Image (spheres, rainbow, N blue to C red):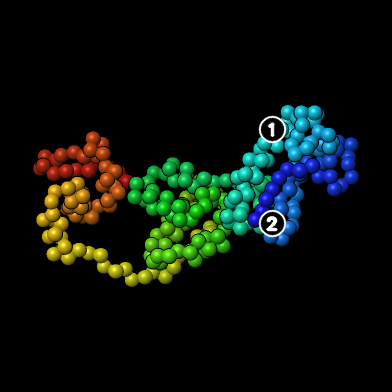
Amino acid sequence: MITGKVILYTHQRELSGGYPIKIRLIDGKTRKSTYIRTGYYSKRKDFNTEPKRSHPQYSELIYDYTDWLKKIATLLPRANRNRWSLEYLVKQFKQEEYFDVEKFIEGLNLSSSTKQIYQGGVKWLQCNDFAALSGEYVSRRIAQWPHSNNGLNIYIRSLNALWNKAVSQGYLRGENPFVGKTLPSERTRSKSLSLEELKIVFDCRESLYKDMFLLQLYLGGIDFVDLWNLNYREHYQWSDKNHISFCISL
């Protein structure tokens, strides 16, 4: 586990401005430490565990010090979850890249069913920051998938499409971690209802669930989520032949 904090680095000769203030990152497994320069210096009397008001640059330093703590709080959980190396974590500190894929999905013009597939893929991936993804991390998540290959492939293809959209819009760059990750397809068990099973549905008592099912059937298999999200005033109209028309663009 990697930990981090801001320290006054007193292991070198003190300069006229004092000792350098650095961000220390420690790999708990190897006990290896890496230091990031901040560009600030301080006398011992002006820095304890944080800058003191007596520091000559306190107003600027305390602002940057707070920002460093925010970066540590944001990046370290991602680093430990994704098993980053210290070198990669330092790179992330310096370039400050973060891409919130959930916000990106919300901004796309997608049908509700497609949006739910994308969101399901992100939830399965357990990583909301695409800028921090690696092919190794995706492979580990795939190895933990407990269901059929076909279901996983839906997520992989949707995440691959999301990555490509983000790259085309300038949000991401680099190698796509989802390329080549799909698994061999499996034969899908038929889930079609028999005539006897359909008759049971037709003969059951009236209910919203029955109406929704039959409407899906009459509409040629419309996706349930899309049907559920239709708004009567916005999407329904009666035609001259007493038929329902759907005024919706997906």
Q: Is residue 58 left or right of residue 116?
A: right
Q: Secondary structure at mark 2?
A: loop
Q: Position of residue 136 (x, y in %)?
A: 56, 62
Q: Residue at x 13, y 51 (%)?
A: 205
Q: Position of residue 197 (x, y in %)?
A: 16, 62
Q: Residue at x 26, y 36 (%)?
A: 234
Q: Secondary structure at mark 1?
A: helix
* Residue type of the residue flagged with mark 2: Gly
Mark number, residue 28 = 2
Q: Earlier in the sequence, mark 1 or mark 2?
A: 2
Q: Position of residue 238 (x, y in %)?
A: 15, 39
Q: Residue at x 30, y 49 (%)?
A: 225
Q: Residue at x 57, y 46 (%)?
A: 98
Does 196 appear above or below 131? below
* Residue type of the residue flagged with mark 1: Tyr
What is the C-alpha distance between the residues marked 1 and 2?
29 Å
Residue 175 in view in this figure: no
Q: Residues within 10 Å of mark 2 (few under 14, many from 20)?
A: few
Of residues 113 and 61, which is closer to you in this image?
61
Quadrant in the rendering for residue 23: top right
Q: Are marks 1 and 2 in contact (CB under 8 Å)?
A: no
Mark number, residue 63 = 1
Q: Position of residue 242 (x, y in %)?
A: 11, 42
Does 206 appear above or below 151? above
